[in-house]
Image: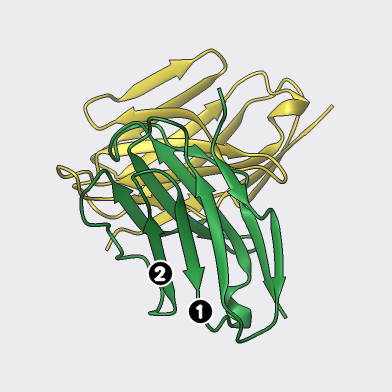
Chain colours: A green, B yellow
Amino acid sequence: GAGVSQSPSNKVTEKGKDVELRCDPISGHTALYWYRQSLGQGLEFLIYFQGNSAPDKSGLPSDRFSAERTGGSVSTLTIQRTQQEDSAVYLCASSLAGLAYEQYFGPGTRLTVT
Amino acid sequence: GENVEQHPSTLSVQEGDSAVIKCTYSDSASNYFPWYKQELGKGPQLIIDIRSNVGEKKDQRIAVTLNKTAKHFSLHITETQPEDSAVYFCAVSTIRGSQGNLIFGKGTKLSVKP
């Protein structure tokens, strides 16, 4: 079946602009995660959605970052007033249920802020 | 909070040799330890995981060992092949009910020379 998809695959934006990154999880997966991967670094947790529960936003680095998940499926990560340090690969993952289950990752969106 | 250290950062082996990657963690309450493989331009893929009630788990050429007392766990790849070349990440989670998230190590770039 289809895996996790993300769009766009690459995004170049000017400093100060807003960007939206999209994630389509695997159908039937109730949990969705966003991570950030900077060059040569590990994955940094950003936010976690599980069903209809309030999202765990504890990893968001600043109030310029926000995410929504509509209808328990598609998620959008929004970065407002982008800064150069926001340049990274943004990865989305989904899993069948909660945190103890295998997370399936999408290919990521490479964001470059110039 | 949890801190995950991963060593080495790069590892080069000859085809057929074994490779070992080690991770240490700080939170004794951590109870889930997955390993992910990331190929260039792709999202990470779970290759094996272990839970805190198990000391060792094996899947064909891949094995993971866990020492909860010392708070470290290791990935062992035997009979390495060129297609094993990738970046490997360990992760740690402290799952309490529906809370918790994966904390990743910084990754190990494994190169298998034919």
Whether residue B104 can be seen here? no
Q: Quadrant of residue B57?
A: top left
Q: Which residue is mark 1?
A: A80
Q: Tell me the subunit letter for badge 2.
A: A
Q: Amino acid at mark 1?
A: Gln
Task: Give the class, few, some or many, for how many residues have Cα within 10 Å of label 2's Cα (few <14, many ≥20).
Answer: some
Residue B46 vs A67, above or below: the answer is: above
Q: Is residue B102 left or right of residue A42?
A: left
Which element type, helix, strand or loop, lies under badge 2? strand
Q: Position of residue A27 (x, y in %)?
A: 44, 31
| Quadrant the C terminus of chain A occupies | bottom right
In terms of depth relative to the viewer, which is nearer, A98 or B65?
A: A98
Question: Which comes before the other along the chain, label 2 or label 1?
Answer: 2
**Quarter of the image holding residue B114?**
top right
**Residue underneath mark 2:** A66
Q: Residue furthest front?
A: A71
Is the residue under label 1 in contact with that under label 2 (CB below 8 Å)? yes
Q: Secondary structure at mark 1?
A: loop
Label 2, label 1: how many angstroms apart (C-alpha)?
Answer: 8 Å
- Amino acid type, mark 2: Ser
| x and y, in percent, of residue A36 in the image | 52, 60
Number of dots carrying numbers: 2
Query: What residue sits 70% from the left and 65% below the top?
Result: A11
Q: Position of residue A58 (x, y in %)?
A: 29, 65
Q: Nearer the viewer, residue B64 or A80?
A: A80
Camera-side residue of B77 and B92? B92
Residue furthest out toward the bottom: A16
Q: Is residue B9 above or below residue A46?
A: above
The chain letter for the residue carrying disc 1 is A
